[in-house]
């Protein structure tokens, strides 16, 4: 089986565009949560989110492309541009038939859907754009990437709610491992901070309503957590077969060695109360990577800041890692970025790569009141230095989807 390494990173996030700004914000504990500016929230229970404030799509594509793409596709294209640049990849020097694109998205073109529906109601069906469907459908993020760069390997979208990004990375890993591709552009993208999405999550009572303190609203594992905060953006990673990367003298951030996927088979939104699905995903990743549970140094947790997720992810970690669970540094970077839904796991994978490379664990900010049911080391409030040889990143999605990737320091 081929070894697979990560050689390029592109981050489009609420706390920074580009891996350098993203990482600097993470280790400084900077929050990207603030009042929503994109639409009027007067009638909404929640008025806060982690928006991307300084994104100009014309920095990455021409005006015609911008008009023909939804924001989630623009984020994916921009992240790809940055990842290829970061990886110093000259695509004219690779076999494009063996380069694939696998991108996760939980919702797709929500913004386009809402705008076109408004046209339908206000102006009638003849005013709907002929680009409506191709802009909205979630496979257009990888489709547009493949067309832009003339990449002819497997191109697909993974849609498993908040686990989409990790499933995309894991499936890309397996395709390279078994020799289908030499290189895959992978990750996730989401742009769902819209009126309908916000109203929908509010109706579920899933979102924080800590409107008076936006920067403190996302507080994973804290006893006073009251729901997640919506975020947006994309994380794009270049996965590459090891020898292919070595031949071009690539910088290697980490090696991906394991992938686990499971289903709770329990409920459309609530996690399994015994945390068996999350436990199994982590155990399968360890088994796949042939790594013992007591070798794990860091876990980037799903850590959404909802009552049940944080409690049950903690339980799953204890079941897998036993007494070693208390030796592991854990953090939820959602405390800073908010929850990017289908894009969450991909920026968390980037955070995990950089944590391994730099030997620094980003914090869980806003951790103020310990919860007796969440009693592990969540790296509260300040980044810490630690050599990381093996790290995990978890993602758990509505519908009971669970995905874990296992990364190793490359030596």
Image (tube, rainbow, N blue to C red):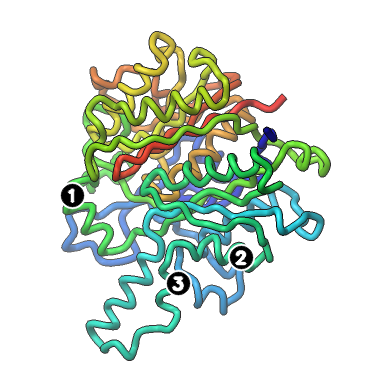
Structural crowding at the residue carrying mark 2, measured as other residues with C-alpha within 10 Å and reported as few (<14), some (14–19) or many (≥20): some
Q: Which residue is mark 3?
A: 135
Q: Are marks 3 and 1 in contact (CB under 8 Å)?
A: no
Question: Where residue 251 appears, x then y in whole percent?
Answer: 74, 38
**In terms of secondary structure, where does tag 3 sit?**
helix
Q: Which residue is mark 2?
A: 60
Question: Where residue 272 appears, x then y in whole percent?
Answer: 25, 32
Structural crowding at the residue carrying mark 3, measured as other residues with C-alpha within 10 Å and reported as few (<14), some (14–19) or many (≥20): many
Q: CA distance from mark 1 to mark 2?
A: 36 Å
Q: CA distance from mark 3 to mark 1?
A: 27 Å
Q: CA distance from mark 3 to mark 2?
A: 17 Å
What residue is drawn where x is 24% and y is 37%? 266
Q: Which residue is mark 1?
A: 204
Asked whether 98 or 253 is in front, the reply is: 98
N-term mark: 3 or 1: 3
What is the quadrant of residue 367 in the picture?
top left
Asked whether 75 or 296 is in front, the reply is: 296
């Amino acid at each position: 089986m081929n070894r697979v390494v990560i050689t390029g990173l592109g981050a489009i996030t609420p706390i920074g565009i580009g891996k350098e700004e993203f990482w600097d914000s993470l280790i400084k504990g900077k929050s990207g949560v603030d009042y929503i500016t994109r639409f009027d929230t007067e009638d909404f229970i929640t008025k806060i989110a982690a928006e991307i404030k300084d994104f100009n799509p014309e920095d990455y594509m021409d005006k015609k492309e911008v008009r023909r793409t939804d924001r989630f596709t623009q984020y994916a294209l921009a992240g790809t541009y940055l990842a290829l640049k970061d990886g110093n990849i000259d695509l004219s020097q690779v076999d494009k038939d063996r380069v694939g694109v696998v991108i996760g998205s939980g919702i797709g073109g929500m913004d386009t859907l809402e705008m076109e529906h408004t046209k339908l109601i206000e102006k009638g069906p003849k005013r709907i754009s002929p680009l409506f469907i191709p802009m909205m459908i979630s496979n257009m993020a990888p489709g547009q990437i493949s067309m832009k760069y003339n990449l002819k390997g497997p191109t697909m979208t993974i849609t498993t709610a908040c686990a989409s990004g990790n499933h995309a990375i894991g499936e890309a890993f397996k395709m390279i491992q078994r020799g289908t591709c030499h290189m895959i552009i992978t990750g996730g993208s989401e742009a769902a901070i819209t009126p309908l999405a916000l109203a929908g999550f509010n109706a579920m009572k899933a979102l924080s309503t800590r409107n008076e303190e936006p920067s403190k609203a996302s507080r994973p594992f804290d006893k006073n957590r009251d729901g997640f905060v919506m975020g947006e953006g994309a994380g794009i990673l270049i996965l590459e077969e090891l020898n292919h990367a070595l031949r071009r003298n690539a910088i290697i951030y980490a090696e991906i060695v394991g992938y686990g996927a499971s289903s709770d088979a329990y409920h459309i939104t609530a996690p399994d109360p015994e945390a068996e699905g999350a436990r199994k995903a982590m155990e399968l990743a360890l088994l796949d990577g042939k790594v013992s549970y007591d070798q794990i140094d860091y876990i980037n947790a799903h850590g959404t800041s909802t009552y049940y997720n944080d409690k049950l992810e903690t339980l799953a970690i204890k079941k897998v890692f036993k007494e070693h669970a208390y030796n592991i540094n854990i953090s939820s970077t959602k405390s800073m970025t908010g929850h990017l839904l289908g894009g969450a796991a991909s920026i968390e994978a980037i955070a995990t790569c950089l944590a391994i490379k730099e030997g620094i664990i980003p914090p869980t900010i806003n951790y103020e009141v310990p919860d007796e049911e969440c009693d592990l080391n969540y790296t509260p409030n300040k980044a810490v230095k630690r050599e990381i040889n093996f790290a995990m990143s978890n993602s758990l999605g509505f519908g009971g989807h669970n995905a874990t990737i296992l990364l190793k320091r490359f030596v």
